[in-house]
Image (cartoon, rainbow, N blue to C red):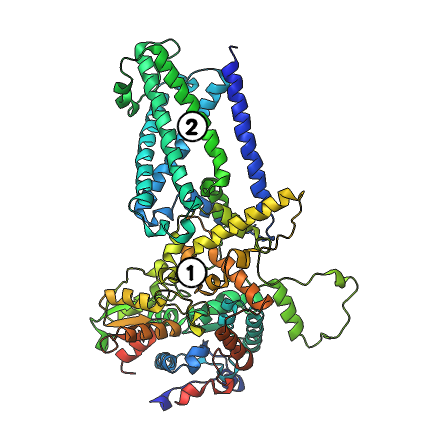
Amino acid sequence: MEYLPQIVFAIALIIGVGYFARNVKRIKRNINLGRDEDVSDNKSQRWKNMTMIALGQSKMVKRPIAGILHVIVYVGFVIINIEVLEIIIDGLTGKHRIFSSAGTIYDVLIASFEILAFLVLVAVIVFWLRRNVIKLKRFLSSEMKGWPKNDGNIILYFEVVLMCLFLTMNATDLQLQLNGAEGYANAGSFPVSQYLLPLFDGLSNATLIAIERSAWWLHILGILVFLNYLYFSKHLHILLAFPNTYYGNLKPKGQFGNLEEVTNEVKMMMDPNVDPFAAPPEGAEAAVPAKFGASDVQDLSWVNLMNAYSCTECGRCTSECPANQTGKKLSPRKIMMDTRDRLEEVGKNIDANKGEFKDDGKQLLGDYITNEELWACTSCNACVEACPISIDPLNIIMQMRQYLVMEQSAAPMELNNMMTNIENNGAPWPYNQMDRLNWKNE
Amino acid sequence: MSDLLKVPTMAEFMAAGKQPEVLFWVGCAGSFDDRAKKITKAFVKLLNKSNVEFAVLGTEESCTGDPAKRAGNEFLFQMQAVTNIEVMNAYEIKKIVTACPHCFNTIKNEYPGLGGTYEVMHHTQFLKSLLNDGRLTIEGGEYKGKRITFHDPCYLGRANNVYEAPRDLIRKLDAELVEMKSCKSRGLCCGAGGAQMFKDAEPGNKEVNIERTEQALETKPEIIAAGCPFCNTMMTDGVKNKEKEGQIAVMDIAELIANAQDL
């Protein structure tokens, strides 16, 4: 019986981490449904980007208020996790505050955790006010109704509860230390939770221990639950921001990739030595004609799909989008949310059909993202620039336009006219190429 | 005036057995659009004044394919690109300057993968280099002390991180450069990019160029400076929509520099 708490703890830890690992595998499988894209180049620049943008939050602080509050929560999250390490070791070994032998260093650590916990609480409350009271425009768009709105708030509630439990645990511990209770040796410095002591005034040691233990257990169980909430939430960014910034685009933003399949065909067309009526070489029949552009998540690259899982729906992209600012339906954030939703749907389909995708009569184009949204884009890159973790919604929009034009000939009439003009006279307007230099004499 | 313009073609250079210092890629707007043609001429005047040995492709130039690519027609884009690259490689072109950020971006970034690698400069960068080399002088003239705001073209700014060359030139005019609330990397699009120039906008509550013009008007400018023929059109329309065309001119930077010297 003596070991019961440790056994319970170990089981909780295994379930929590195990279930999370299962979901990580699922995310990896889903991301790999995307087509291959080689991003193995330029490793040093990539590490630099990850260090600056994800670790260093360089793009977050471009909007100072949200940025600085975010840095507090982020630093708090990272540093308070040292405490979680202690909690896990304590839980498995049945010890209490195992790091306390570090003496002064321990005091400093606990004190900094407490101060950060308090700052995190303040930041999270401001975040909640921004979402629910101040009602910032970017949190009210149509794609933010329902689950995305609730998700945002649930994360904040989680953080409030976890921080309160942490401080309660420390406050009761301190009271027990002051009371000289057995097992509660003097350890740590409590610059914040000392102010909570009046709340526990006059309670017996037994009650205090019950509160301290409950807070301790709920805190660590809460963290395990939160860990497993990530998969269902926009909050996955706390992990995926790192690979996402690492694999982010390194080329000039204006450079759109040239489709290789098209290059091959164009080369054939331009090569005077190619016989258009020649029989295909032996074995070439098996080659499936390439699909140009993207109509569903499997046509997108794995980086696009990782982008979709990384998006935390902050809406900076949408608030900078010229189309969205002027009331058009396009919202770059929605493009990312739709991509993730559809990818999840495809993933569930695969799980339900023994590892194979069964056509469900749906696709990303049409069922999630409409042509109207795609045609409203000015390709200005404002969304790409705004994203704090290097997500590229424009890349997805362009691939879907390619599908619309090259597979479906579904461009708006005026664009078809423009393209016909380019084809016939080398300019988007109906002018004769032979008149190109007329301006010289006008 | 126009008979003073010297605009040699690559074919003429080739016939004379010479190679120009730079190819001026005029672009479709610069060749055909009435407003943009004025920008082309202003830039040529500056090239002539600075004794730059340049050439144009003339009737051998064709659309870079940018609007086709942004519209999703990769086929048409690559057909255009390969054709243009063939022409330019045959002339052994090394350096290109253009007054259109869309041509600039496409030739600079998207042609190398298709066999066309050149040093490509936007005309503001090129003018800046002429200034640095002492080949071009800039004087304020009629623009001295005027309030000028610069609208960043997306394909020059965000797309290629060129923010300073146009601003440096405006400062050289002794003008008062005032920034809009969204500028440089956060500059708002004029609404023409991504092939939007050639179609009506999707339903919404405002046109993008009106939104951008309002931002420009907030700076109380006397001149809105542009560096792109399409932005120029959009901003000009925006100013007309606000019935301010009497007070506020939309001008390309090349035009400002040329006009200041009465070229």
Q: Nearer the viewer, residue B135 or B95?
A: B95
Residue type, numbered disc 2: Ile
Q: Which residue is painted at 43% across and 62% down in the image?
A: B159
Whether residue A406 is visible: yes
Above or below — where is B191 with respect to A152? Answer: below
Q: Nearer the viewer, residue A302 or A268?
A: A302
Tell me residue B203's x, y (percent).
40, 66
Q: Nearer the viewer, residue A51 or B223?
A: B223
Q: Nearer the viewer, residue A5 or A77?
A: A5
Q: Which residue is painted at 37% across and 61% down in the image?
A: A327
Query: Mark 2 belongs to which subunit?
Result: A
Q: Secondary structure at mark 1?
A: loop
Mark 2, residue position: A82
Query: Mark 1 belongs to which subunit?
Result: A
3D distance between C-alphas at marks 1 and 2: 45 Å
The image's mark for residue A329 is 1
Q: Which residue is painted at 71% across and 74% down in the image?
A: A274
Q: Residues within 10 Å of mark 1 (few under 14, many from 20)?
A: many
Residue A115: quadrant of the picture: top left
Above or below — where is B198 with respect to A316? Answer: below
The tag earlier along the polypeptide, 1 or 2, is 2
